[in-house]
Amino acid sequence: MRTIETDVAVIGAGAAGLSAAIAAAEKGVQVSVFEKGKTTGGTGNMGMGLFAVESRHQKLRQMGPSKEDAFRVFMEFTHWRVDALLVRTYIEKSADTIEWLESMGVEFLEPMAYFPGGWPTWHIVKPGGGPGCAANMFKKMTLYAKKLGVQFYFNTPVKRLVKEKDKITGCVAENQDGEIMVKAKAVIIATGGCGNNPHMIKQHTGLEWGKDLFSFRVAGIDGDGIRMAWEIGAKPTKITMQLIYIMPGEVHPQLAEAFRQPHLLVNLKGQRFINEGIIFNSTFVANAIFNQPNKIAYMIFDENIKQHMENVGFDFIHVPFPFFKLNNFEILNENCFKRGIKDVIFICDSIEELAEKTGIDMDGLKEQLEKYNYYCEKGFDPDFNKNTRYLRPIKKPKFYAGKLALGGYGSLGGISINYKCEVVDKDNQLIKGLYAAGTDANTINADTYVFILPGNTMGFAVNSGRIAGENAAEYVKK
């Protein structure tokens, strides 16, 4: 068996792992990164940017929130069911992390909110070309890491940790030539959660992938780090999915945007269950859909509303895909159909046909439509107090319905850490030399992702990676 000796071994080269490796190397210790895939960035390559408060970009534009406001909002949103000291440490470090990244050549756009009423904490990486623009950041981080002397071992997954008495002394990795004994004074787990492991997802969340969950699946994100940590006695935490709502299948973003507007949202019984005015808040709507029959819902509009979206524009503009008007609906829908995306978007000549094709209870839908159209006529929604400007009747054929289901950016949580990102055991005692960062240890969101402060998944990954790397280096140097 080949042997590699290093001061700090980092498992995973995604947002958290890269940040950890750089932070540790900046402290002057030897760092080796073992990556299951063939490149750096991990799921972060699909992202756009990260959370920060009181960054120079926000101060320059006199944007909130303050660190105090962000902490208060975070803790109230999570009902204090998270580690307040870990949240505080993360928030306090966030602005400095933006400057840290900028020192590597990373550039950011003006901070943004994700939806109306949210805070502009999302620092999107330039050039801001939608999902995936953060890949530019990881390229620059990788170059900087290599300049610092960080060694990368790609296509080399770690299989297990090595623990002697009360401390970690390394890990065992594997490549095409066989197993590798990695002797390390500290190990940092940053493997990105278990979003590609349907068994773990169902076991810990009850959600079945492909049936009532259509999350992003990135090859290699299989829960390896969580499993290894548990095997050597790390304290487990609850694993949740970072739930959002989506249209199943790869529906064109502009087409999907037509069904992410405040029209009429019903469940399979034909009943409304939310104020559609919150449709911009992906996590809140996902929570509501979670409680509906079969965990699905249908957004419905008619020809008049379709023409409104084409001529006047959308009510809500979403940052990742900033479309302002609906264009080429029929062409985009036909392209989806040709690509095998069926039973997601329905175009019908009557409400009866729409109910039959979607499986919505016909009597329930007719009753709901009669009531809803009456509310639109009167200009008041006594059921959910929907804003009058969104009360548009649904009467004119054709009728359109889009299926909304649960999706997720990935898993959150699994490994219990303290505010230094040190892993603890079931008795809350430190497992010496073991650290965890990123989604493997992201327990700061409780039961609902804190979307009101956008950029938190990548923000926590990068900041917790820094924290883990800095503390691992200090531990090694003692």
Image (spheres, rainbow, N blue to C red):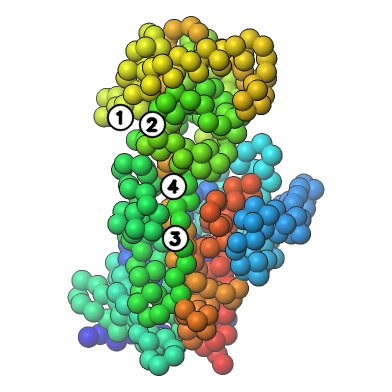
Amino acid type at circle 1 is Ile
Give the camera-side residue of 180 and 224. Answer: 224
Q: Are marks 3 and 4 in contact (CB under 8 Å)?
A: no
Lateral position of residue 121 relative to residue 425, left or right: right
Residue at numbered disc 3 = 239
Q: Residue at x 40, y 80 (%)?
A: 233
Residue at numbered disc 1 = 341
Nearer mark to the viewer, of 4 and 1 = 4
Quadrant for the C terminus in the image: bottom right
Task: Give the CA separation, mark 2 to mark 4.
Answer: 16 Å
Nearer mark to the viewer, of 3 and 4 = 3
Badge 4, how many Cα within 10 Å: few under 14, some, many 20+?
many
Element assignment for label 3? loop
The image shows residue 302 at horizontal and vertical percentages of 48, 13
Q: Is 223 drawn above or below residue 61 in the view shown?
A: below
Q: Are marks 2 and 4 in contact (CB under 8 Å)?
A: no
Element assignment for label 2? loop
Query: Of the residues under marks 1 and 2, which one precedes in the sequence?
Result: 2
Quadrant for the N terminus in the image: bottom left
Give the camera-side residue of 95 and 362. Answer: 362
Nearer mark to the viewer, of 1 and 3 = 3
Residue at numbered disc 2 = 251
Q: Mark on residue 408?
A: 4
Q: Residue at x 37, y 80 (%)?
A: 232
Nearer mark to the viewer, of 2 and 4 = 4
**Is any part of residue 1 visible from this angle?**
yes
Lateral position of residue 277 relative to residue 170, left or right: right
